[in-house]
Image (cartoon, rainbow, N blue to C red):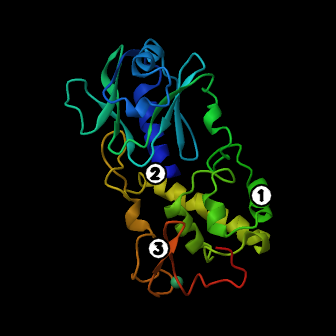
Amino acid sequence: MPELPEVEVVRRGLAAGITGRRVARVEVLHPRPVRRHLLGATDFAAQLTGRTFAEPRRRGKYLWLPFTDGDALLAHLGMSGQFRLDHSSSPDAPNTRIRIALVDGDPELRFVDQRMFGGLSLALDGAELPAEIAHIGRDPFDPAFDLGAAVARLRHKRTGIKRALLDQQLVSGIGNIYADEALWRARLHYARSTDTLPRPAAVDVLTQAAAVMREALGQGGTSFDSLYVNVNGSSGYFDRRLAVYGREGEPCPRCGTAIRREPFMNRSSYRCPRCQRVPRHARF
Ligand SMILES: [Zn+2]
């Protein structure tokens, strides 16, 4: 699943590509990605037609495309959802599900989704923040993000640090990749208990998470999944800079010890067994 930097790459591409443009026609090629629209695909298409896009917005990993009338199109990227900006004459990419033609011509907006866990839905009055994602915490790139408050929330939880980092209500935008990288930078084991974590360590790990995501954004994101591309169909380069994620058996860039992969929440955690030792106060 894309994390904050990858979604921000998409948001920027869409901001440059659709802001201020009006919808001429919507074609729903498969009903599944609009299943959240209870009145069906035909109504979905009719509802969008004639509206003008404002600048796309994001909170954490969640992206929405506001309209100038105050409503918004909420994107659920799921495992494989992508937006593409393509010329109307160019053939559909494989798994194109929704085509949105714009009044002023090319490029048009297409939603592509191989596995179709994602989709698009209309969020009434959602331009500022769709109600469906109002419970999501602010992410570290948000100008209103309050680090002190986030640290307090984190230390108030009785859980493991990685679970806390992945909790989108606590701090949003961090997924498996950037959690592992932030923990490695902060020299913390993923199961370190949050309620006994000293305040400076909590500040450090959240600061490291923001830093690694900012670096990833500078590289166009991480192409951890061949399904994941930006609106132009190309992927990012940050995977070359990852210290631990996906690097089982490779030397830790800091101490040379072989990186270890361990099962965690139905996925994996990568850590350096020397830099990130198993803590006395562990919560798995
Ligand atoms: Zn190490």
Please state the horizontal and vertical placement of residue 25, each as a whole percent of the image.
35, 15
Please state the horizontal and vertical placement of residue 273, each as a whole percent of the image.
54, 85
Q: How crowded is mark 1: few (under 14 residues within 10 Å), some or many (20 or more)?
A: some
Q: Residues within 10 Å of mark 3 (few under 14, many from 20)?
A: many
Which residue is the site of mark 1?
153
**What residue lies at 60% left-to-right and 58% top-to-bottom?**
210
The Cα–Cα distance between marks 1 and 3, rounded to whole angstroms, is 27 Å
**What residue lies at 49% left-to-right and 44% top-to-bottom?**
8
Q: What residue type is labelled 3?
A: Val
Closer to the eye: label 3 or 2 = 2
Q: What residue type is labelled 2?
A: Pro
**What residue lies at 30% left-to-right and 43% top-to-bottom?**
233
- Dot 1 or dot 3, earlier in sequence: 1
The Cα–Cα distance between marks 2 and 1, rounded to whole angstroms, is 25 Å
- Are the residues tagged 3 and 2 within 8 Å (C-beta)? no
Which residue is the site of mark 2?
2
Quadrant including the C terminus: bottom right
> Does dot 2 land on a helix, a strand or a loop?
loop
Label 3 CB less than 8 angstroms from ligand 1: no
Please state the horizontal and vertical placement of residue 201, each as a whole percent of the image.
72, 72
Closer to the eye: label 1 or 3 = 1
Q: Quadrant of residue 144?
A: top right
Q: Which amino acid does label 1 sit on?
A: Arg
Residue 207 seen anywhere in this rendered image of the structure? no
Q: Quadrant of residue 155?
A: bottom right
- Dot 3 or dot 2, earlier in sequence: 2
Q: In which quarter of the image is residue 16?
A: top left
> Does dot 3 land on a helix, a strand or a loop?
loop
Please state the horizontal and vertical placement of residue 12, each as a whole percent of the image.
46, 38
Which residue is the site of mark 3?
244
